[in-house]
Amino acid sequence: MTRDRATPLRLFWLGTLSMILIVSQSLMAQARGVPESFADLAQRVSPSVVNITTSTVVAGRTGPQGIVPEGSPFEDLFRDFQDRGGPDRPRRSSALGSGFVISEDGYIVTNNHVIEGADEITIEFFSGRELKAELKGTDPNTDIALLKVESDEPLPYVNFGNSDGARVGDWVMAMGNPLGQGFSVSAGIVSARNRALSGTYDDYIQTDAAINRGNSGGPLFNMEGDVIGVNTAILSPTGGSIGIGFSMASNVVTKVVEQLKEFGETRRGWLGVRIQDVTEDEAEALGLEEAKGALVSDVPEGPAMEAGMMAGDVILSFDGVTVEDTRQLVRVVANTPVGETVRVVVFREGATQTLKVTLGRREEAQGAVPAAASGGPEAEAPSEVEVLGLTLSPLTAEIRGELDLDEGTNGLAVMDVAPTSQAFEKGLRAGDVITEAGQSAVTTVAELQDRIDEAGEEGRKSILLLVRRGGDPRFVALGLNKD
């Protein structure tokens, strides 16, 4: 009797423990933010995601170029084959990609490389409906394009989310037309943030959600169904997804889309300086407490020059935003409206100064040529001297000619660099020209030595040199106690 009563009791407690374990696992999953399914989200946003087919006329070939190498024994064979088929005529080439609708009146976002060079653009919706699209504008710098279709009825669309709110580890969902297979969904997490590939304005979200060819231009969704990225590129040795995909952050895309919609082109702010990141050595040489900000290496004619900015200034703040490095400064400036006057805080000669700069437009300044270095006295004697592992000589007419320099260029020519020196490690080479030391112009070795002595007397461990190579300036900090 006792054993019979114990068995149901034991089963009761086993069942209770099982229920507790299931509830506990469920709560843990919720705490981690693990979705039970992506089905509801996919069903909700699918109508706004589109397949894009482009058609381009490609000129016919007049011979077997690109098929067999010139001079190959198979060259005649391929030429005969083409001749039998009649003269080559222009042909149409098609390409596939993805995109998404951002407004009920038919604006669609995709990648520039999806529609670049296209003569016709066809949009296929989730329902199977097809519409021809008009190209409204492109931005190759961020690989974004804006299309427009005309529809008799409002179109389903999605909203952009705040990509800055995406955290590493958050769940995301990618949607598009991979490898031309039609609408497809993949899921993963945010693997990294603020990735830079090759562009000036890059701000990519890295994800392990499967992205393949044909996904380009498609949306990357957060769990609220907002677009936080435009799927743009993958890193792969095979051409297929290996779990390293990149989506251009929505906070970059939205500004580009706004300008393409309003102007049909981008209009980015332009400060008008050449800049480089601040290294620890350069920070020490300049007297900065931290290696932060953007070091100005050149100020050609433009907004910054008009505001009084100088080479050697370190930009610490732009329009109230603390500048961490050059990449951040470029993006902040580009996102500031053209013609707006902003406050720029710079570090100069041990103190901060605030300059007011009225921004120009970058697109209009793309062809601007940096101003030549200011003129100075011609060196009297071309004697060579070794300093800090560098063999230096004042510039003469003969040396300017050998280095193909303008007549107004003054400074010290680097004739040789000791292979074991710090200067060699930091990239200085014969043919470089040192125009400044310690933020003062130098035209003779004696002037350079004076700047070195002054830095030593001030307790500095390094000196900052402004070096030009082929007209491009950059700052280099060299230690004073190294040959």
Image (cartoon, helix red, strand yellow):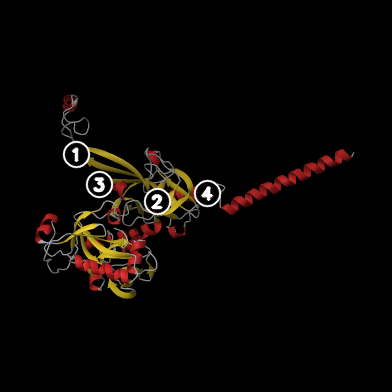
Amino acid type for the residue under numbered disc 3: Gly
Label 1 crowd (10 A; few <14 / some 14-19 / many >=20): few
Q: Do we see residue 335 in this rendering? A: no
Percent across and percent down for residue 229 are: 41, 53
The residue lying at 78 percent from left, 44 percent from top is 12
- Quadrant hosting residue 426: bottom left
Q: Which residue matches tag 4?
A: 40
The residue lying at 20 percent from left, 67 percent from top is 446
Amino acid type for the residue under numbered disc 1: Ala
> Which mark's residue is nearer the viewer, 3 or 4?
3
Circle number at residue 59: 1
> Which mark's residue is nearer the viewer, 2 or 1?
2
Amino acid type for the residue under numbered disc 4: Asp
> Which mark's residue is nearer the viewer, 2 or 4?
2
Amino acid type for the residue under numbered disc 2: Ser
Left or right of residue 361: residue 71:
left
